[in-house]
Image: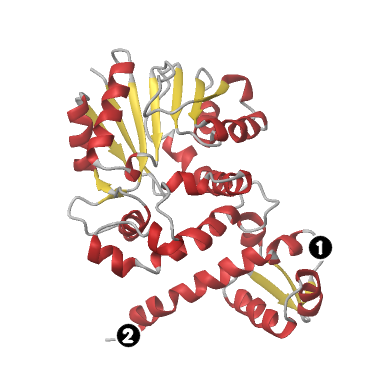
Amino acid sequence: MSPAPILDLIEAFRRSKAMFTAVRLGIFNVLAQSSPQSAEELAATLNVNAPALTRLLDGCVALGLLEKEKGAYRNAPLTARYLAGNSPDTLANYIIYSDQSLYQLWAHLDDAVREGANRWTQAFGSRDALFDHYFRDEAATAAFLGGMHGFGQIASPLIVRAFDLSRFQHLVDLGGATGHLAIAACEAYPNLRATVLDLPHVERFAREHIARSSVADRIHAVAGDFFTGDLAKGDLYYLGRILHDWGEDKITKLLRKIFDALPPGGGLLVGETLVNDNRSGPVSSLMQDLNMLVCTDGKERTFAEYQTLLGAAGFKSVDFRRTGSLIDAIFAVKS
């Protein structure tokens, strides 16, 4: 029996941290705006140690993130699309968020398992609420929302097509951040209008992203708190990676609020990663479940668990689809 799977797991964090560091240093951004550069040229631009940078650059070549020819480095095509900051598909902000926040929290996974609680105080010396931390200032807000936007652009087009939503007229995306789901939905359904509702300091970022889309005339961004304020009126609501942040009591109240706001025949679309009913996988969902343990008061759930929560809120017709991507789709209809 080969130890290769164990050895791969031992080294996995090294690969992640090499990519995280290259993103945070700005290596891929510099190379995206220039011709291939030597390690010495890059070191001078980034103000880092040239021999040490060479070792990181060569590691990135081995990972397939960079290409090297005659001592000069350039971005690999995958890197140019997903890691360079000037790409519309960039995941760079999500990587920075992972490095600055999640990586620190995961260092205390053992204590989270012992105590059954998130590690914010242990990692950062503060018990500030999760989103208070991410929205603590303009720069932090922009970085966090940029990360969520890059992540969301991958899954949103798949989620809005997982079910036929063509009969709906007005989508309300609760906690919609930059509006990536609303944009994808309006692109998929020409007769659909959308409202993106999020906290006041998020609204400006939503407007900016919406304005750059081809469907800006059908999407409106409004400020509000869906837990405490009134919900914008619509016949279809969306909750994307919202429910996994919270415990059952808070979720049930929110779902009941949405149910009461919907007209008969109205729908609720939910985007969450789904754990298999026997909790055998998928690996990404179970790793995300551990992420929720160190990061929030919530968890990832099976479809059966979501079906129970939606049923308790009044929904009778509930179905799901695997999207093959980072987030799956659940759809409930108000009878």
Please, is residue 297 above or below residue 230 in the view? below
Please, is residue 109 above or below residue 159 in the view? below
Near-viewer residue (312 or 285): 312
User: Which image quadrant: the C terminus?
Assistant: top left
The mark found on residue 56 in the picture is none
The mark found on residue 34 in the picture is 1
Tell me the SS state at disc 2.
Answer: loop
Please, is residue 109 above or below residue 2 in the view? above
Near-viewer residue (175 or 301): 175
The mark found on residue 3 in the picture is 2
Residue at the spot 43% in from the left edge and 28% down from the top edge: 225
Q: Earlier in the sequence, mark 1 or mark 2?
A: 2
Tell me the SS state at disc 1.
Answer: loop
| Residue type marked 1 | Ser
Residue at the spot 26% in from the left edge and 29% down from the top edge: 253
| Residue type marked 2 | Pro
Please, is residue 260 above or below residue 313 in the view? above
Measured as percent of width and height from the top left, residue 291 is found at 36, 57
Q: Quadrant of residue 322?
A: top left
Residue at the spot 67% in from the left edge and 57% down from the top edge: 84
Q: Residues within 10 Å of mark 2 (few under 14, many from 20)?
A: few
Q: Quadrant of residue 240?
A: top left
Measured as percent of width and height from the top left, residue 48 is found at 73, 76
Q: Residue furthest top?
A: 264
